Image (cartoon, rainbow, N blue to C red):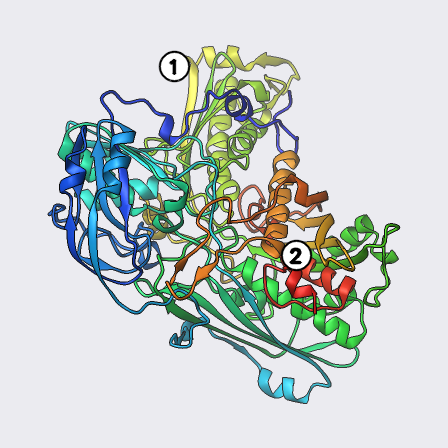
Amino acid sequence: MDGSIGVPVVRRDGAAKTSGTALYAADFPHADTAYAALTTSTVTRGRIIRIDTTEAEAVPGVQMVLTHHSLNETLGEETFVMKGGHMQSSFMPLTSDEVHYAGQIVALVVADTQEAAEEASRKVSVDYAAQHASASIEDADRVEEPMDDKSIDVGDAEAAFDRAPVKVDATYLTPAQHHNPIELYGATAVWQDGKLLVNAPSQWVVGNQAGLAAIFGLPMDDIRVESPYLGGGFGAKATILPHTVLVAMAARRLGRPVKLVVPRETGFTVSSFRPATRSRVRLAAEQDGTIVAVMHDEAAQSAVIDHVAFPATGVTARMYASPNIRMRESTIATDVNTPGFQRAPAEAPGFFGFESAVDELAVALGMDPIELRIKNEPVCDPVKGLPWSSRSLVPCFRRGAELFGWNRRTPEVGSMTTPDGMLLGWGCASATYPSAMCPSSARVKLSADGTCVVSCAAHDLGTGAYTVLGQVAADVLGVPDELVRVHLGDSTLPSGPVAGGSVTTGSAGSAVHMAALAVRERLLKAAAGGGDPASFTLAGGHVIGPDSHGRPVAEVLASVTGGMIEETADWKPGSMSGDQMRMGLAGGMAFAGPTTETHASYSFGAQFAEVRVDPLLRTVRVSRMVGVFACGRIINPRTARSNLMGGMIWGASFALLEETKVDRPRARFANTDLAGYHFSTNADIGEVVVETVDEVDTVVNAIGAKAVGEIGIVGMPAAIANAIYHATGVRVRKTPILVEDLLG
């Protein structure tokens, strides 16, 4: 079948996953494997004053118990990813007697069987000197720390706000939320001849390789990280988790492979999470709807051990044309494990408040919320005045309104009902996500048997990278899809980017495109002999010459030494320096954009929600969602649609269900299991309609692809909140929106 760009090719990894033959990190077999289990802290903050491993070591089959007393190893310098390293946190458990958060690792047990390791982990006895702790941004003893370098000031927003006749000033809250991928966290470490192999679920094998090399003082070539498939990551598997280091240390000491699979409950604290936020949004407009002031002050939860923030205001500042913009960011340190990336880490919580406030402004103006947004559409980046590489938000709203039937909406609160008496609410919101890019390498090999092999140490999170990267090569070389092979997720392959920030298709895809063009050039040159290669072309598996007669590609390749052509390419974004590219290809975090010296590059979308609210019970059902997105060139409509739909469903979950509850007196997360941590299932979701608009972007990268992976979640929580207001007249300014929020 045709595997070129724009064709809805079926996922290349689908058969392996549905048949059970795909190997996830914990599936790799290693002879003589020992098994690990964790003991975690029962207090939130303090010190370990006594730890006794006697009973644990007496369990039959136990080989080792690591604590802060027995670790006794000097590790190489590595730090938190947001400080230029590769770790999930700058704090490494077992390196001191300090306890910084509930659920912190205080011991690692290794035994011959999983059962023995788990039994022994429960018999590690620990006494603590506990100290006062707080895990909530609402606790009064927590002070906001401003992030002055994230401030944005255009014009005089305060003065414009004061003068304006119509204004909104409201505060919105989002809670902490946790990743719950189907595939649990874990790691297997194998040492052989001084070299380390790690099988761990990873979104960044090259970054993990670089970080582990620094920690263990080894050349990068002596470390191999292998993660060909992921059972969900969402950002949590982008960095090196501390338990991976501890498992590797245990394996080296023991002289045999060690495997750890982290239980679901423990996964809430050995990895990262989406931090809670508080946003104050102030918008002001003239009576005709012209926005004259935009202000967004966001305070986000951080950790005492790591000052980290994922600022949303740099994105919300770019949504609407206003001569006066004021954005402020701050953090609130709490006694929790270090927060981290989670699908649209800044944008999803930031847009809930911001796009809810835009809806409130439309209500105050008596104006249709779509027309308010369109009226204030910026012709260029409102912050820096840069032209957009492309921006098709207005076509998204026009098409979305048509699909949704927005013209049938009556604006009065509670004015729409269903035949069975449910209150019907319709809401909308804008969405955006920055189209940043990373450097990437890729190798493409075309063989005489017609097969095309693509290799890159990038990742398929489950969103289609195996498929779309193969399509990029097939498009250049004219190879049918069934003859394309793609290898990903192994640090021995050419360096690929982190699977985060929606960069994989644009970055790794551009490298594949570059390598495939080099293969094509050599193929045409071979076909031309001493003639002009420019007069030859590829079509239908044949090389067509100027006389219009074709020769099979296999025949041309038979004349090439080795019977195949292979090329490796290093690609970088145009605005990136050579030094940055080399740093990125060596496992460093190197992003270019979304704003450069010449352009601002973002994906955009319009999202619509229909809710049905029981007038007595006040239960909410999301009966319809529509999303229309402009994400540059769509390489595969099937995988893009699935990706965007998944984000929209997660957005519904964000709006109505997801919350990591904090036991404030004990300063710890309370609902650390899938029974208490609620998220959307099939029964919660009605019809979901997804479309993309055609968009040509010749600026963003070599193949014109912009961010797809994360934008789907961004606007949906606000669209649902706005629909609930339309149905009930109750403006809920926090998530999740619960029955009790609507009873007043």
Residue 103, horizontal then vertical, whole percent = 32, 52
Residue 464, horizontal then vertical, whole percent = 55, 34
Above or below: residue 427 compared with residue 505: below
Residue 389 visible to an observer of this rendering: no
Q: Amino acid at mark 1?
A: Thr
Q: Residue at x 58, y 44 (%)?
A: 705
Residue 697, horizontal then vertical, whole percent = 62, 49
Residue 388, horizontal then vertical, whole percent = 61, 59
Q: Please tell me which residue lies in front, 47 or 313.
A: 47
Of the image marks 2 and 1, the number of the one nearer the N terminus? 2
Quadrant position of the N terminus in the picture? top right
Quadrant position of the C terminus in the picture? bottom right
Q: Residue at x 59, y 53 (%)?
A: 657
Query: Image check: 627 left or right of 23?
Result: right
User: How far apart in space, not on screen, are marks 2 and 1 (Cα)?
Assistant: 47 Å
The residue that label 1 is drawn on is 561
Q: Residue at x 46, y 20 (%)?
A: 21
The residue that label 2 is drawn on is 391
Label 2 Cα crowd, 10 Å radius (few <14 / some 14-19 / many 20+)? many
**SS class of the residue under badge 2?**
loop
